[in-house]
Amino acid sequence: MSITKEKDLSQIVETAVNRHGTHGDALIPILLEINEEYGHIPASALQDVSGKLHAGENGTVVSEGQLFSLASFYHMLSTKQRGEHVVQFCESAPCHVQGGRELRQAIQEYLGLAAGETSPDGKWTLVTTSCIGLCGVGPVIIIDEELYGNVTPEQLPDIFARYE
Amino acid sequence: MNFSRSMVLVSSDPESVRRGADEIYALFEKEIAARDMEGEISISRLTDTGRPDAAPIVVIYPEAVVYGPVNAENVKEIVEEHLYKGRVAEHLLAPTRELSGRIGWLKTRKGTLPAEKRIVLRRAGRIDPENIEEYIAEDGYQALAKALTGMKATEVIDVLKESGLQGRGGAGFPTGLKWSFVAGTQSEKKYVVCNADESEPGTFKDRVILEGDPLAIIEAMTIAGYAVGADEGFVYVRGEYKLAQNRLENAVKQAREYGLLGKNIMDTAFSFDIHIHSGAGAYICGEETALLESIEGKRGEPRSRPPYPTTEGLWGKPTLVNNVETLANVPPILLNGGQWYRQFGTPSSPGTKVYTILGNVNFTGLIEVPMGITLREVVNIYGQGMKDGATFKLAQTGGSSGSVIPASLQDTPMDFESFRKAGVSLGSGALLICDENTCVVDLALVLQKFFKFESCGKCTPCRVGTGRIHEILTGIVEGRGTLKDMENLDYLVDSLTRISNCGLGQTASVPINDVLKYFRPELEAHIKLGVCPCGVCPMSAPVKEPAAVA
């Protein structure tokens, strides 16, 4: 989910609304698509979506505020800009007892970030995630869309070097 | 799959190892290899036999014969006589008096080695999940054909009731009964929803079913639609399961092309269609009413029940909500009959259950076994013993909201009824196995952090309670615990369980409650002595300053 500033935000919104329609069950899919294409959901996009849904045939009347309440509720949606690479760290119990405790410490030290922070140069964002169902190979981290299992603190320099 | 005809278990508790168990294990491998029997006989370690005086012990299945104490010279004879010629080496048997206590359960399993039985996972990994023809070739769509062409809707529900299938999402509600509720509600429009928002930490059974056999869910939902009188279905898949979503989309597309979804399925009057709906990252959406809210495009905040979804569900219409694993059981039951299903599992909980084995064991992964096997069997047989020969301390069943089960309860059969009697919950099928290096307070803290994070915030007991428990536990692991904390924890556990609005809050206190119940001394050691017995918690308390006078 790296930032693609080149892409035109209003174009992304239009494509998403056209694809998913204007019925109530389309709201979350629309927001997911914007988040995926743009990296996060800026306030202007929420305004845009709200306007398009009003205008649509059989459209649902949804205020910007309602859309923001969705975007801030679901963890996969971000209303804030994120770094170039997003590091997700699974902090659920199965990973925790299999060495996740030590790994978490090591990642925070390596990147110099606490969970939820973005590095000043905009390169890294570190977030924690709930279980992603890969517990058989825990502890697990995800960088952008790439999954890494059975990770040990010693492997971190090699893993992060791939994104330099 | 490779099935072994015999299984050799060598004890590996510290006493056995001191008396040469590792050497015996290696000798068994060598002797079995020497007779080219590696493919037929599996060897694993057995921990915690509870009989150090007869150590090292060797148990051979399926005869459930216990040898002991075994020394290196005996190995060749056991392999030669028992495994090769099929005769029990009588003079090497452990004395009968040694078979009491914990080792006794092994004898009771004589002839009934709890073998894997794959019903739900029978196709996963064996067929191309993206090719409907392979699915059809493996009995696919036969159950739907049988239902549509030869059965009334009520007959389909009767077969399910007869089978005794219970919901596999964790609560264990009788599936046939739920279907009959929806079928019995009069409405122009009804929905079938598959709950594939599998977010219980440590559970990934549904992911494997969806990725390995997506059409089984599509077929089962279509059958459900016919049985309850619905014409539209939703699969709510959690947002993180991208591959499962793609495979389901593809399955729906192919089913439509083959006339197995859409108008007039199999040229009958029945029409049904399915949408794949992605979640967006919220644990609470696994709660069925929160899930329905989320499909409708709202925040995933649970509704008050009643009315239940069976009468007022999606957009106020009667809705059947079933878990993935539950649905995957439906086609085979319909094909083979309710009585067939009852031959597996226990009388009160028929069928099989898919478990995920995780944590400090040698094998982590997925198994499908009849209901009613015990934790000890899971750890020693399927988990192939504890990692590094450590001792089994506790297991957490069913993800974050599951029970923390101490070693003393590991012989309780795992079925809904027995677990209810023992006061623990079976949950979604995750089995997190922890060794003696796991600190329960630290584990409880991690779990509580999860609930604090995932509480939707709608009702006060859950929003405040989960945060408060987390705060108290943080204080305890940092060495700031007081005895008053214990009282407060008891109080919070009680309030959360009684007055939270939905299952999240009501079960968020389950693990901490179990810690208070079974591991109180360990918790007290943190508070009274200021030490973590496992050496995990930081415990670096800043010196307590006297409270300032207000």
Image (spheres, grey):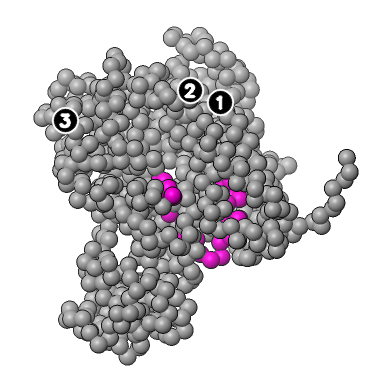
Quadrant in which the C terminus of chain B appears: top right
Q: Position of residue A122 (x, y in %)?
A: 68, 40
Q: Answer whether residue B429 is magenta in the image.
A: yes
Pointers 2 and 1 in contact (C-beta within 8 Å): yes
Q: Are marks 3 and 2 on the same chain?
A: yes
Q: Position of residue B206 (x, y in %)?
A: 37, 43
Neighbour class for label 2 at 10 Å: few (<14), some, many (≥20)?
Answer: many
Q: Residue at x 52, y 28 (%)?
A: B301
Q: Position of residue B468 (x, y in %)?
A: 65, 41
Quadrant in which the N terminus of chain B appears: bottom left
Residue nearer the viewer, B330 or B486: B486
The chain identifier of the residue carrying mark 1 reads A
Neighbour class for label 3 at 10 Å: few (<14), some, many (≥20)?
Answer: some
Q: Are marks 2 and 1 on the same chain?
A: no
Q: Which residue is mark 2?
A: B297
A92 lies left or right of B256: right
Q: Amino acid at mark 2?
A: Gly
Which residue, as the protein is rendered here, is positioned at the far left?
B150
Instruction: Determine whether the residue tagged by mark 1 lies in a helix, strand or loop.
Output: helix
B72 lies left or right of A51: left
Residue nearer the viewer, A150 or B448: B448
**Alpha carbon distance from label 3 to label 1:** 42 Å
Q: Position of residue B409 (x, y in %)?
A: 43, 59
B137 lies left or right of A31: left
Q: Which residue is mark 1?
A: A70
Q: Amino acid at mark 1?
A: Leu
- Nearer to us: label 3 or label 2: 3
**Alpha carbon distance from label 2 to label 1:** 8 Å
Instruction: Determine whether the residue tagged by mark 2 lies in a helix, strand or loop.
Output: loop
Q: What residue range appears in magenta?
A: B423-448
Residue B155 badge: 3
Q: Amino acid at mark 3?
A: Glu
